[in-house]
Image (cartoon, rainbow, N blue to C red):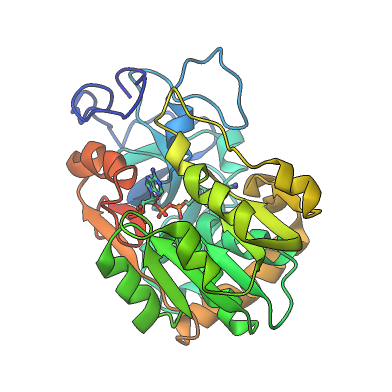
């Protein structure tokens, strides 16, 4: 992380691939922790919010300048001074955009071993940072606990082909809702219709969003991944007492002069519930872990839930791939494959 961006992060300027350090695995100071060889690392939109100065407070810490970015990753334990971790185990948690990460004893508290039972499901390692990791948890929690879906209702999902949206859409189909989704290319729209069996999907860049939503019953749930104009359109198309799951607003992350939403009065007139959430709050509840991991990885393994991932090979591609998610270049969950094993 080389420089704080004011709008889009520019590869080679704000984000740089550098070879400026080595690790001597025979003499590394682990401080009672472990060393992981990093295999995959996630790219997520919230990372843009971490590209800020340390003084500006938010729910997740600012990235440290001139240090590797950090995010959800899967790695393999290659050295351990901590009895809870054994060499050869796969680990999920926070790691660095680097080939090896040294996790101090305190940092290992935030890591979890991917159990042998889970490994036996045979999912690609990338999926543990995607549908079977934080974005899947976001979809599950936002849809069920905030959306409060009921069979026969209508849901509109923006960013529908992305990491979160594709899972929300499939959960909604399972629960018997009418599912409408939007995405930014015709290929993504086609995939939503033909592979995920959305009832309707459209390209928000070329279609009239209000006219598309008007073709259906009023919305009972809006799962918001993007904010901006589509949020405004969803307010107009909402039924009385609709639930707005405010998951994210990616259209605003690189825009210093974001414009306001013009029809907020409809929140009152239609008695809407708009609720934001941060999934990490929910992840502190052991019962949520149990509920999520007992269902979603199995549903993926047996094909009940399909997963589309956009895997970029090699850390040197990371700056471009990170910028890419803010330009709609990823088709599915964006992940970097750092090493094969
Ligand atoms: P995605 O995999 O969907 O990747 C981002 C996608 O957003 C792009 O591919 C692009 O798709 C779309 N996009 C980019 N810019 C715009 C824009 N200006 N207007 C509309 N769409 C745009 O990301 P995720 O599924 O991981 O994340 C989706 C949302 O969920 C984000 O807002 C993220 O911040 C939020 N989130 C919130 C969490 C929480 O705890 N509240 C946790 C995890 C994610 P397209 O081609 O369709 O435009």
Which quadrant is the N terminus positioned in?
top left
Between 114 and 177, the one lying in front of the other is 177
Question: As drawn, is 193 to the left or to the right of 86?
Answer: left
Question: Where 30 sits versus 311, above or below?
Answer: above
Q: How many marks?
A: 0
Q: Residue at x 25, y 45 (%)?
A: 321
Between 36 and 69, the one lying in front of the other is 69
Question: As drawn, is 49 to the left or to the right of 69?
Answer: right
Q: Residue at x 41, y 28 (%)?
A: 255
**Coordinates of residue 63 in the picture (x, y in percent):** 44, 25
The quadrant where residue 324 appears? top left
Q: Residue at x 72, y 59 (%)?
A: 243
Q: Residue at x 49, y 58 (%)?
A: 210
Question: As drawn, is 313 to the left or to the right of 70?
Answer: left
**Coordinates of residue 186 in the picture (x, y in percent):** 27, 66
Between 244 and 74, the one lying in front of the other is 244
Whether residue 284 is visible here, answered yes or no, is no
Whether residue 1 is visible here, answered yes or no, is yes
- Name the residue at the top extreme: 55
**Coordinates of residue 36 in the picture (x, y in percent):** 39, 46
Which quadrant is the C terminus positioned in?
bottom left
**Coordinates of residue 244 in the picture (x, y in percent):** 67, 55
Question: Where 88 sits versus 278, above or below?
Answer: below
Question: Where 170 sits versus 133, above or below?
Answer: below
């Amino acid at each position: 992380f080389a420089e704080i961006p004011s709008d889009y992060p520019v590869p080679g300027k704000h984000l740089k691939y550098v070879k400026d350090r080595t690790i001597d695995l025979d003499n590394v100071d682990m401080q009672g922790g472990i060393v992981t060889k990093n295999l995959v690392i996630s790219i997520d939109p919230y990372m843009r919010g971490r590209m800020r100065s340390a003084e500006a407070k938010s729910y997740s810490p600012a990235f440290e300048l001139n240090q590797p970015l950090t995010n959800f990753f899967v790695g393999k334990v290659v050295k351990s001074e901590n009895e809870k971790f054994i060499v050869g185990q796969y680990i999920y948690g926070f790691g660095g955009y680097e080939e090896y990460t040294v996790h101090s004893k305190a940092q290992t508290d935030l890591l979890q071993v991917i159990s042998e039972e889970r490994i036996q499901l045979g999912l690609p390692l990338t999926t543990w940072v995607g549908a079977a990791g934080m974005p899947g948890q976001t979809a599950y929690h936002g849809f069920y606990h905030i959306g409060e879906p009921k069979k026969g209702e209508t849901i509109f999902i923006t960013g529908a082909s992305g990491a979160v949206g594709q899972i929300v859409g499939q959960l909604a189909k399972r629960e018997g809702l009418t599912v409408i989704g939007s995405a930014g290319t015709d290929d993504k729209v086609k995939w939503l219709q033909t592979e995920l069996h959305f009832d309707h999907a459209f390209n928000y860049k070329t279609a009239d969003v209000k006219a598309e939503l008007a073709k259906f019953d009023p919305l009972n749930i809006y799962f918001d991944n993007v904010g901006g104009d589509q949020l405004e359109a969803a307010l107009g198309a909402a039924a009385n007492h609709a639930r707005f799951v405010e998951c994210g607003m990616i259209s605003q992350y690189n825009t210093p002069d974001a414009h306001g939403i013009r029809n907020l009065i409809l929140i009152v007139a239609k008695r809407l519930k708009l609720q934001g959430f941060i999934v990490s709050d929910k992840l502190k509840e052991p019962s949520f872990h149990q509920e999520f991991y007992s269902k979603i990885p199995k549903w993926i393994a047996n094909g009940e839930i399909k997963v589309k991932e956009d895997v970029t090979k090699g850390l040197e591609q990371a700056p471009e791939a990170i910028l890419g998610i803010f330009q709609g270049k990823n088709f599915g969950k964006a992940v970097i494959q750092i090493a094969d094993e």
